[in-house]
Amino acid sequence: MHEIRLGFVLMENYFNYFTEIEEHFCRRRGTLLQLSPLDWALIETWKDSGIPLEAALRGVDATFDHYERRPSKTKKVNGLAWCAQEVLAAAEEIKEAAVGSAREETKASGQSATEIAEFFTQNAQKLRQIEVAAPVQQVARECAASLEAAASGLNDVAAAAPLLEELERKMTVLEEKLVAALMLSTSEEDLVRFRAEADRAIAPYRSKMPAAQIAQLQKQYIHKRLFEQATIPRLSLFYM
């Protein structure tokens, strides 16, 4: 998997990362086809790896451009995984183009501190309301308290322009705590089922993705299913 700093994405203020990719893919495909759970997990691997939105959109365009030039179109581009190689290539091009350029630590301009604080508060309320196994519930309450503290800090006038990378790093840590608790409390049968779902979904695209990306995609898919089953909200700023 290409290593690209998460901060590179955050500096571009792409809070609509997921919806932009979904809408662009559907527009190029020319249908109202909704993304699959695997597609959403793949977008998350791109987000977590710091793939810029521009690279994802370029990769989608390149995939469809190549497809449209083919004399025979027996196979359709039915999922984002078909675009994986082109997305990684576009990300590498952007990364190389950025080498040597000055990068300043950027503050939020796309979303106000008040909007981010509200997002944190809403997620804290959801975490306090979920009904799950006691160990997970304890971690959920701890995360809710952390979110409430972060929201309180954002409401301070001095925090009118919060550092996105710092906030996203905190949300990543909270999600990792929740995932760890969920993995321990989820039955072996459910975990095997989630893994089987991931393997079936990935199977048609294995030849198009490197092994490292497949492993990461499997992990993200399972994490996504764990959150869904427990009705736990996603905390990342990209879900605003």
Image (cartoon, rainbow, N blue to C red):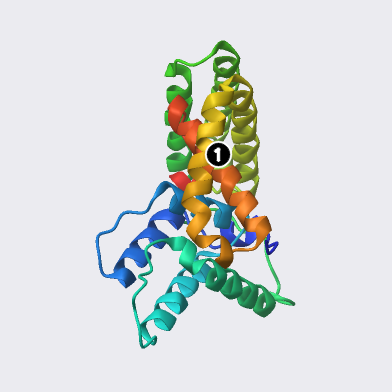
Measuring from the top left, give residue 20's x and y in whole percent.
Answer: 39, 61
**In the figure, 171 relative to 24: above or below?**
above
Residue 150, horizontal then vertical, whole percent: 57, 32
Q: Is residue 210 above or below residue 137?
A: below
Identify the residue at image location x=61%, y=32%: 174
Is residue 116 in view?
A: yes
Question: Which residue has dot 1 on it?
Answer: 195
Residue 35 in the image, given as x and y percentages of width and height: 36, 54
Quarter residue 68 falls in: bottom left
| Residue shown at 34% from the left, 62% from the top | 23
Considering the numbered disc 1 on the image, is that residue within a helix, a strand or a loop?
Answer: helix
Front residue of 161 and 165: 165
State the image coordinates of residue 129 (x, y, percent, origin top left): 42, 17
Image quadrant where one finds the N terminus: bottom right
Residue drawn at point x = 51 percent, y = 36 percent: 194
Which residue is depicted at the point 68% across and 56% down? 212
- Judge by depth and name the residue closer to the eye, 217 or 234: 217
**Quadrant location, the C terminus:** top left
Between residues 188 and 160, which one lies in front from this camera angle? Answer: 188
User: Which residue sits furthest right?
Assistant: 100
Residue 148 visible in the current orientation: no
Amino acid of disc 1:
Arg
Check disc 1: other Cα within 10 Å, few if <14, some if 14-19, many if 20+.
some
178 lies above or below 201: above
Q: Nearer the viewer, residue 147 or 27?
A: 27
Is residue 11 placed above or below 70 in the rendered structure?
above
- Number of on-image labels: 1
